[in-house]
Amino acid sequence: DVVLTQTPVSLLISLGGQASISCRSSQSLVHSNGNTYLHWYLQKPGQSPQLLIYQVSNRFSGIPDRFSGSGSGTDFTLKISRVEPEDLGVYYCLQRTHNPPWTFGGGTKLELK
Amino acid sequence: QVKLQQSGAELVKPGASVKLSCKTSGYTFSTSYMSWFKQIPGQSIEWIGMIYAGDGGTGYNQKFKGKATLTVDTSSSTAYMDLSSLTTEDSAVYFCARSIIRGIPFDYWGQGVMVTVSS
């Protein structure tokens, strides 16, 4: 199975600050069709995960441009600029490149400083 | 709008089975996929398996084969997951989430249901 390693495990950020989360894969996430199926989710406390970014860098419907994704191959980054209170929660990366099981990273908890 | 409504919390005894439901609305269920996930509180998320509502075709995480069985009822636009031979290790929150195309993964999720296995 593909292992996704997220760092840091937790992140203390001031309101208005910038956060950066890394997701490293045990295998390249480039599919044979040339696409990279690495996605990002936010799970707010007590809620189900919500899709933020799909295929590395595409914001899902309604997601503000404060969220941006980048990366290639095995290394990917989610950046959140001008952090707001509603951004707090646990962020997960997910890969759907390789045959199931599709796998999530261990999560990064974003908290206020 | 798209909605996925899961059934309520379950308290079940070890060795028993439980059937969870995920009732959908707001989109064409029969041309979509439904996945199920397990999350132990405080831990990450595991993908259990997926079913295509059009023909009932399934794919499972090897870890959950024999534990989970996925089915659908297209007449009511509802997906189901049966969990069998429950142990305390199956105590977790279970989510359903739909996907339509590979490029955009699980875009809408149910609210989750807590399953507690205890004698």
Image (tube, grey):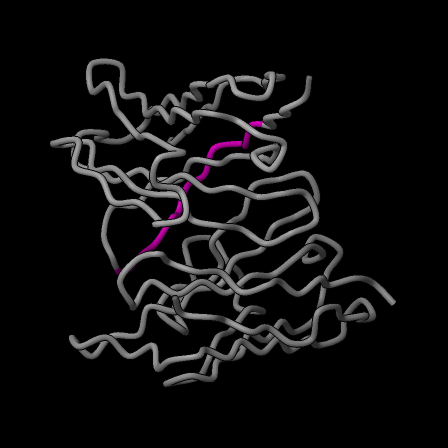
Q: Position of residue A21 (x, y in %)?
A: 62, 75
Viewer-nearest residue: A84 or A32: A32
Which image quarter is the N terminus of chain B in? top left
User: In this rendering, would B76 be left or right of A102?
Assistant: left
Q: Is residue A102 above or below residue B75?
A: below
The boundaries of the magenta stretch are: B103-113
Which image quarter is the C terminus of chain B in? top right
Viewer-nearest residue: A109 or B63: B63
Q: Position of residue A95 (x, y in %)?
A: 39, 65
Viewer-nearest residue: A93 or A20: A93
Residue A25 figure quarter: bottom left
Q: Is residue B107 magenta?
A: yes
Q: Is residue A32 above or below residue B90?
A: below
Q: Position of residue B26 (x, y in %)?
A: 32, 27
Q: Is residue A13 above or below residue B13?
A: below
User: In this rendering, would A71 be left or right of A111?
Assistant: left
User: In this rendering, would B76 be left or right of B5?
Assistant: left
**Which residue appears at 43% of the width and 60% of the height?**
A103
Residue B117 figure quarter: top right
Q: Is residue B93 above or below residue B23?
A: below
